[in-house]
Amino acid sequence: MDNDADLDYAIPGRATAVAAEALYLANLMLIPGLGFVALLVLWWRERERAPELARGHLRQTVAASLWAGVLLVAANVAIILLGGYDSAYTWIVVVLYFTTCHSTLIFCGAIGLSRALAGKPFRFPLIGPR
């Protein structure tokens, strides 16, 4: 008997929670945009009928993805305000964005994925809805 398959049925919403967290990480690291669209499709399909665990992870990952987009736009606005993409400040903003914002979002996504795999809820610090 496969223990991993048994866990999916033992904890209601676990598979959807794991899918939400995996799509969130895919959006940030592997397939930007496409991962977000897939996450929105999953959220749209499951938001009302999913168990509480899955709804929580879906809500958190969609909110964190929207915040990631806002932070990316803010970094680009900062680049433009500091002299455009040919300015020396461009690399300062890019390095600061990736070492603080982007890496923190990925780190929190990895924690969220581990919590989803364990069948436990997770709330993103600062940006996660209650």
Image (cartoon, rainbow, N blue to C red):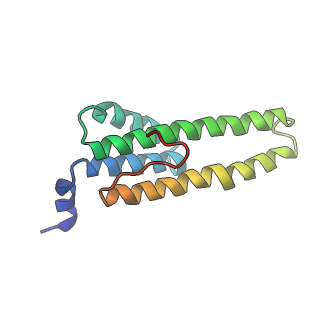
The answer to whether residue 34 is visible is no
Q: Residue at x 69, y 36 (%)?
A: 74
Image quadrant for the C terminus? top left
Residue 33, percent across and down? 51, 38
Q: Nearer the viewer, residue 54 or 89?
A: 54
Between 127 and 66, the residue placed more toward the observer is 127
Q: Residue at x 48, y 38 (%)?
A: 63
Image side of residue 6 versus residue 117, left or right: left
| Residue 48 locus on image (x, y percent) | 27, 31
Question: Horizontal and vertical percent for residue 109?
Answer: 48, 53
Up/down of 57 relative to 1, above or below: above
Residue 66 shown left or right of residue 52 in the figure: right
Q: Residue at x 64, y 39 (%)?
A: 71
- Residue 115's quadrant in the figure? bottom left
Residue 59 visible to an observer of this rendering = yes
**Residue farthest left in this picture:** 1
In this view, the residue in front, 2 or 52, is: 52
Q: Quadrant of the N terminus?
A: bottom left
Q: Is residue 111 above or below residue 27?
A: below
Q: What residue lies at 77% left-to-right and 46% top-to-bottom?
A: 93
Residue furthest out toward the front: 130
